[in-house]
Image: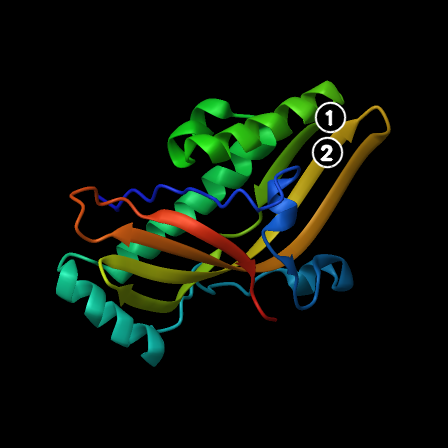
Amino acid sequence: MPELIVFAVLAAVVLYQLYATLGRRVGRQPEDTPAAVAAPAAGRPADNAEPVPAVAATGVAALRARQPDFDVGRFLTGARQAYAMILKAFAAGDRETLKPLLAPDVMANFEAAIVAREADGRTESVEILAPPRVDLDSAAVDGDVGRAVVRILAEVRTRSSSAAGDAVDDRRTADLWTFERDLKSRDPNWTLVRVAVAEA
């Protein structure tokens, strides 16, 4: 089974609208191109990850020296799944899904943001329009800490409703998510320690 990736987002991440902080618009946006042109070409794979770059390959070798069962594909599958889970759960105010994915102090910040949104009478939802592209940007071992940086490219549609009306926003985003794991621990889970906007 894929490794379960457990995420603890830094408290510094702006939490009032999680998916609005996880990247900036990159490239041509859906509104810039007719739908027939913007749609993926028939037969094109939904997930087309590039080979591991040389800088990451060295780090992967170091990781495997300490964790022989480390598998890049399985790791990236878990990262992709958790990315979707976090965005959707936050938008829906799904506390039960968020709790096992976030450290307690980060969950408290998410909870505060959800409560504020509910108090304002706002509801939100998020749709990931295609499976996010995930690539291992770099990997390293620092002492007993394993580190992996994942580049995530996504197409996201957000919908919000409030007394002021409804709004829909489509965007393409690019992010770098940094994961760490204590290589001495029997716990196989990785923790998200940083979210940054990727360079376009």
Q: Which residue sits at x=59%, y=41%?
A: 127
Residue 113 found in image quarter = top right
**Residue 97 place in picture, x, y as percent:** 44, 28
Q: Which residue sits at x=33%, y=73%?
A: 56
Is tag 2's residue or tag 1's residue first in the polypeptide sequence? 1
Q: Amino acid at mark 1?
A: Arg
Q: Which residue sits at x=15%, y=43%?
A: 186
- The residues bearing labels 2 and 1 have C-alpha atoms spaced at a distance of 7 Å
Residue 62 found in image quarter = bottom left
**Residue under numbered circle 2:** 160
Q: Amino acid at mark 2?
A: Ser
**Residue 176 place in picture, x, y as percent:** 49, 60
Q: Is there a contact, CB below 8 Å, between mark 2 and mark 1?
A: yes
**Residue under numbered circle 1:** 122
For this rendering, which residue is in front, 28 or 197? 197
For this rendering, which residue is in front, 29 or 61? 61
Q: Which residue sits at x=67%, y=31%?
A: 124
Q: Which type of secondary structure does the marked residue at label 2 adopt?
A: strand
Location of residue 190 with respect to 95 vertically, above or below: below
**Residue 178 place in picture, x, y as percent:** 42, 57
The circle drawn on residue 114 is none
Residue at the outermost front position: 143
Residue at the outermost right position: 164
Q: Which type of secondary structure does the marked residue at label 1 adopt?
A: loop
Please state the total of marks drawn on the protein image: 2
Left or right: 174, with 81 as reference point: right
Q: Quadrant of the C terminus?
A: bottom right
